[in-house]
Image: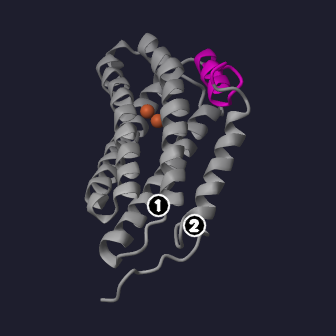
Amino acid sequence: MLPRKIQIQSLRIIEDEHRSLAAVLHGMLHMVREIREHDATPSFDAFGAMVYYIDAFPERFHHPKEDRYLFRLLRLRCPQAGALLDRLEEEHRIGAHKVRTLEQALARYQAGGDGEFPYFAAAVDDYAEFHWKHMGAEENEVLPLAKEHLTKEDWDTIDAAFLGHADPLVGIEAGTEFRGLFRRIVNLAPPPIGLGPEPKARRNG
Ligand SMILES: [Fe+2]
Ligand SMILES: [Fe+2]
């Protein structure tokens, strides 16, 4: 149990990383809805940047740090969290498959045209729904247990990992790289999601 005043940087970083992913998921859902309901022209550049971000950021960067640091230490300090952490680690593995499905659905939509749109839209809905639940469980179940059971030393270790100082697979440059990727999405996505070109309806009515 920690003294109340202590600042835990990794908690803020984890929540910020969840907000960034949520923003990208909202963006994709919005663009899919515009195509479905208003027959907007798809921006494959924006979809491509979003799927790339999802693969590069949560899948290769955020989840592995949760597994290796936050979940590992919480298992040691709070064995009763084991079943919850097993489930969330399994979801990290399932999420990796879902990103492949999303990538393939996007490639098929881009190459095959409108007939492939429903499959792509379903893959976006599925990934977004899956991740809301996943992030919700981490924020509402894991983080409260972590605040209660982890020690100051545990948080120092987790902070170092999430700040990018302690993880040789991630390195300190990664944060800058992901900010750049996020900016690219903002520049490509159509309004009101981003600053890209206004989407055009392909037919009237
Ligand atoms: Fe996670
Ligand atoms: Fe997470």
Which of these two is toward me, 82 or 180?
180
Quadrant in which residue 11 is drawn: top right
Residue drawn at 29 percent across, 57 percent down: 116
Judging from the image, what secondary structure is the residue with disc 2 in?
loop
Verify whether residue 165 appears in magenta. Answer: yes
What whole-number distance in Å separates the C-alpha atoms at marks 2 and 1? 8 Å
Prevailing secondary structure class for the magenta stretch in the rendered image:
helix
Residue type at numbered disc 1: Gly
Q: Is residue 113 above or below residue 85?
A: below
Ligand 1's quadrant: top left
Verify whether residue 14 appears in magenta. Answer: no
Q: Is residue 12 above or below residue 195?
A: above
- Labelled disc at residue 27: 1
* Residue 4 rendering spot, x and y as whole percentages: 59, 32
Residue drawn at 34 percent across, 38 percent down: 98
Give the crowd class for mark 2: few <14, some 14-19, many >=20 residues within 10 Å: some
Name the colour scheme: one colour
Instruction: Single out the residue that lies furthest toward the front.
Output: 111
Residue assigned mark 2: 194
Judging from the image, what secondary structure is the residue with disc 1 in?
helix
Which of these two is toward me, 147 or 33?
33
Residue drawn at 50 percent across, 52 percent down: 48
* Residue 74 rendering spot, x and y as whole percentages: 45, 18
Q: Which residues are magenta?
A: 152-169
* Residue 205 rendering spot, x and y as whole percentages: 30, 89
